[in-house]
Amino acid sequence: MDEYKRAKLNKILIIIVAVLIIISIIFMVSYSIMANKNNKEKLNYDDSIIGKNYYVDITIDTESKEVKRDGKETTLNDEFDIGELKEEELLTSTGNLINFFENSAIEVEMQNKVIHLKNLYQTKTILVEAEEIEDDFNAIDNQEIQKGLFVLKYDTEKKTRAAYQYLQTQPGINKVVIDEVSLINTINDESQTVYGEIKTNEKSSAKAYGVNAMGLNNYKKIIKDNGNPSQVLIATIGYGANIQNEYFKNKIDEDYFNFITREENKKDIHETIPQGSRILEVIKESTSDNIKILPLVVINDENYTTTSSIINAIIYATERADVICYEFAHKKNYMIEKVLYNAFKENVPVCCVTKKAGDNEDIFPASNSTTIAVSSIDKELKTTSYSGNGEYIDFVASSTDVEEIFNTSSSVSKWSGAGYSNAHIASLIALIKTYKKEATILEIYNTLKNYCRDLGVQGRDSVYGYGFPDLPTDRPGGN
């Protein structure tokens, strides 16, 4: 074979080898991509350990063997249903305990011979801010509950953790937030027993002192006499109420809902603390028949709540109600701020309870600029022991002498508390909306300001805000 033919053959062989190499590379890359994709789907995301209750921090003292869930004594068996014998075995060794929780979504940390268990994914839910989600990591439920805000649900905690990590790497995702479980500190009210006769100028059929003190009884009469009022709805977000009681007949809107319980119990809104019924009692006493109440429960019987239950309740209330009465306080939250801002844009006022705060304690959402923060005064128009204070305070209202109507104990006749002042302001706004249904938040706010009795230093202050709303006894909203 001459040199020319040999060179030509070698060239052809080189080309064939190169093509085969390229085909092999393409095949291997394609196989790798498919394998990774299949592997993502085939990875085992089953939970090896499943908690029975919400918790923020479960502690295990390795010396005393004492187990606590958020400060309350419990057992590992009660929390994870592992059996008493298994619990005894685990408690014999710190290493056994740590190893047991290793293959789960539960984070384990040792501090001063105390093991801390935290589970950020126990609701199996994450919150995503994005224009759209191209890949939701095989969520079992994907809902855009507000424009640009998605709630994604998964079937296991480990899958939720993987999705949280995965979605943060995806283009077009602005923010991914864990559905946080929080333990709510109840804003304590105060019981009292009243002896002797009530003063003449305090006599009324109303079961809350503020109804008369703020002139709400007169407005109710004016609305009744004038007729033709708009239908107004107050949504309460918090503890639920004893709505089956005859006392609330014809006052409760049928769309009431429980956002924190299991799916089959969504219409069970029994009060998780008695304060919930008393807040509704104040609203009932303060408002006319055209104003209904929409109770929304976001706190369970053990005082736990979740970010997703709160934001769902706020969105639900914004779509249906004319004013929102927010019954509790907690720490600041980005996603809750997002839905509060939407309520503000939709001109649905959110009245928020405040309380006496500890050091570095954020009273949210009262501290949010889009809400109306309400503090408390007594019958002498003085600030109370449980009053909130700070630059965010907008108004104060009566908080004392709410008649006991559900407690069977004869030793308690009246209650006082921060939640009742907040309920009075929400009720007053509802009365204003009776004849000004489309009033903006600014118009309502200015109406309250214009008729405030200034109780502190001149102008707005951190104790009384703009003061105590004391509107004239004409049609609600003035001219």
Image (spheres, rainbow, N blue to C red):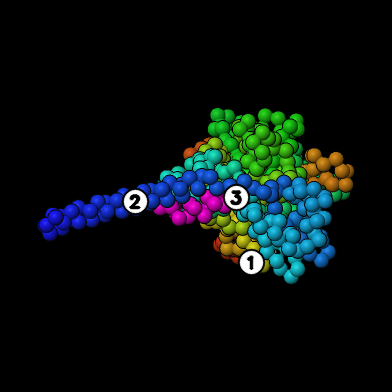
Q: How far apart are the alpha carbons under marks 1 and 3? A: 34 Å
Q: Position of residue 77 (x, y in %)?
A: 78, 50
Instruction: Identify the mark at residue 60; answer none if there is no mark.
Output: none
Residue stretch rendered in magenta on the structure: 159-174
Visible residue check, residue 190: no
Spot occupied by residue 244 in the image (x, y as percentages of width and height) = 74, 32
Does 348 appear in magenta? no
The residues bearing labels 3 and 2 have C-alpha atoms spaced at a distance of 36 Å
Residue 335 point in image, percent of width and height: 53, 52
Q: Quadrant of residue 98?
A: bottom right
Q: Nearer the viewer, residue 222 or 445?
A: 445
Foreground residue, 5 or 127? 5
The answer to the question of whether label 3 and label 2 lie on touching residues, with beta carbons closer than 8 A, is no
Q: Which residue is identified by label 2?
A: 24
The mark found on residue 360 in the picture is: 1
Image-based side of 222 in relation to 70, left or right:
left
Q: Nearer the viewer, mark 3 or mark 2?
A: 2
- Label 3: which residue? 158
